[in-house]
Amino acid sequence: MKEYSKQNKKAWEYDAYAFWIRTSGTPAERAERDMENPERMLRRYAGYFDQYQGIKVANICGSCGKKAVPLALLGADVTVFDISEANRKYAMEVAEAAHVRIGYEVCDILEIDREKYGNTFDVVFMEGGILHYFHDPDEFMRMMNSLLKAGGKMICSDFHPFTKIKDILKFETPSMSYFSTEVFEGEMAHARFYDEKIRSRMPKCSYRKYTISEIINAIIRNGFCLKQFDEHPSWEDDRLPGEFTAVAIKQQSVE
């Protein structure tokens, strides 16, 4: 495991299970909301799936299962890949309470077992802001390509690169030059929800933020045909871009 991945793992396992209980409810409470209307729980991402029933989905950095469980309720065969054991505990308890099965592999995303999972999935899906946890976008996209069957789809939704120059989403993150290639330490996403005493001793994450062209070119260079690139407004200020979704189809395997 890369050193920066070890650092990020430590941050994402800090009080994570208790955090999900506080913010999302008990696993039974979360499961009840998921079962009530699973497609609504997918929000805008529902529009990027052609179908649910019977497809195999790799949910990359799927965290507490907030999208994996709804997908499973809709009939998908979902495997979450995430670095946090605490996230796994909560997700699996939600799935059990919702009476569905999900797979969950706790691992460094860049070290997913390709002997087991290579050329396996119809869809690889990620959302909620994950690209900044990886320092080489080409390495990341090669792994995504390797997990998909030929003709499989990648749905990559993430924070808009404009968040490099302005805290558009109010995450209390530092701003920098849009073209910066700096790797930097910063608070993990949930730190702002803790009081200052706890917040000051929480483990930091290692980040690298990208431009739009870096993301698009990494997709194109690594065996994908980019089919769609949508920009979504910030939930804080709808005049500004807050997120994007890239949809790409696997054209070839990349070593």
Image: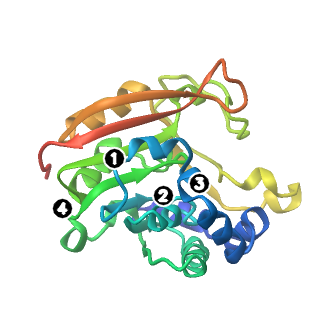
The disc labelled 2 sits on which kind of residue? Tyr
The tag on residue 23 is none
1 or 4: tag closer to the N-terminus: 1
Badge 3 crowding class, 10 Å Cα cut-off, few under 14, some 14 to 19, many 20 or more, is some
2 or 4: tag closer to the N-terminus: 2
Q: Residue 65's quadrant in the figure?
A: bottom right
The residue tagged 4 is 119
Label 3, secondary structure: give it.
helix
Badge 1 crowding class, 10 Å Cα cut-off, few under 14, some 14 to 19, many 20 or more, is few
* Residue found 61% across the figure and 75% down from its top: 90
| Residue 198 image offset from top left, x and y in percent | 83, 63
Apparent side of residue 138 relative to residue 255 in the rendered image (left or right): right
Answer above or below: position of 97 versus 137. Answer: below
| Residue 16 image offset from top left, x and y in percent | 67, 69
The residue tagged 1 is 50
Could you tell me how far apart the alpha carbons at marks 3 and 1 are, in whole angstroms? 17 Å
Residue extending farthest to the front is 36
3 or 1: tag closer to the N-terminus: 3
The disc labelled 1 sits on which kind of residue? Asp
Answer above or below: position of 161 versus 187. Answer: above
Could you tell me how far apart the alpha carbons at marks 1 and 4 are, in whole angstroms? 19 Å
Nearer-the-camera pick, 154 or 54: 54
| Residue 70 image offset from top left, x and y in percent | 52, 62
The residue tagged 2 is 4
